[in-house]
Amino acid sequence: MKILTVCGMGMGSSIILKMNVEKALRNLGVSADVEVADIGTARGAAAGADLVVTSGELATQLGELKAKVVVIDNLVNVDLIATALNAALSDAN
């Protein structure tokens, strides 16, 4: 499974989100490759992703994607991230 975390500039918040997504996935017992992208390169990078994790504001800017978009309102709350990821993974199965 490939997961893409997206922020506006592809640096600070997407890296924090990446680390917290990885923690949430470990808590769920799920293995995945998590990568980061900025909003400008996200559409191309999402082509090979199963999930795209980002904020609600940026989700609307991504447009139509093949990957499922998971909206996270609190990028540092691992429990909320785990809940959102678990729901997305359940929907995929």
Image (cartoon, rainbow, N blue to C red):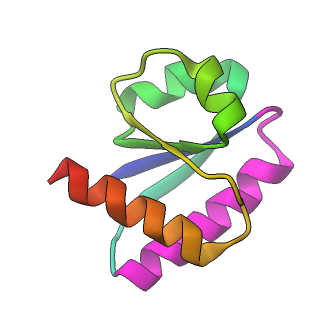
The correct choice, above or below, for 76 with respect to 18 in the image is below
Q: Residue at x 34, y 53 (%)?
A: 88
In which image quadrant can residue 86 be found? bottom left
Where residue 4 appears, x then y in whole percent? 52, 44
Given residues 70 and 40, the one toward you in this image is 70
Magenta-drawn segment: 8-28
Describe residue 49's horizontal placement relative to residue 82 as left or right: left
In which image quadrant can residue 75 be found? bottom right
The C terminus is located in which quarter? Answer: bottom left
**Is residue 88 in the magenta section?**
no
Q: Is residue 87 visible?
A: yes
Given residues 33 and 85, the one toward you in this image is 85
Describe residue 51's horizontal placement relative to residue 37 as left or right: left
Describe residue 78's horizontal placement relative to residue 85 as left or right: right
- Kindly give the residue lying farthest to the top in the view shown: 63
The chief SS type of the magenta part is helix
Q: Is residue 38 visible?
A: no
Q: Residue at x 68, y 72 (%)?
A: 77
Where residue 64 appears, x then y in whole percent? 43, 16
- Kindly give the residue lying farthest to the left in the view shown: 93
Report the number of numbered marks: 0
The correct choice, above or below, for 77 with respect to 58 in the image is below
The correct choice, above or below, for 92 with respect to 63 in the image is below
Q: Residue at x 68, y 30 (%)?
A: 58
Q: Residue at x 61, y 75 (%)?
A: 78
In which image quadrant can residue 38 be found? top right
Describe residue 31's horizontal placement relative to residue 44 as left or right: left
Where residue 9 appears, x then y in whole percent? 83, 33
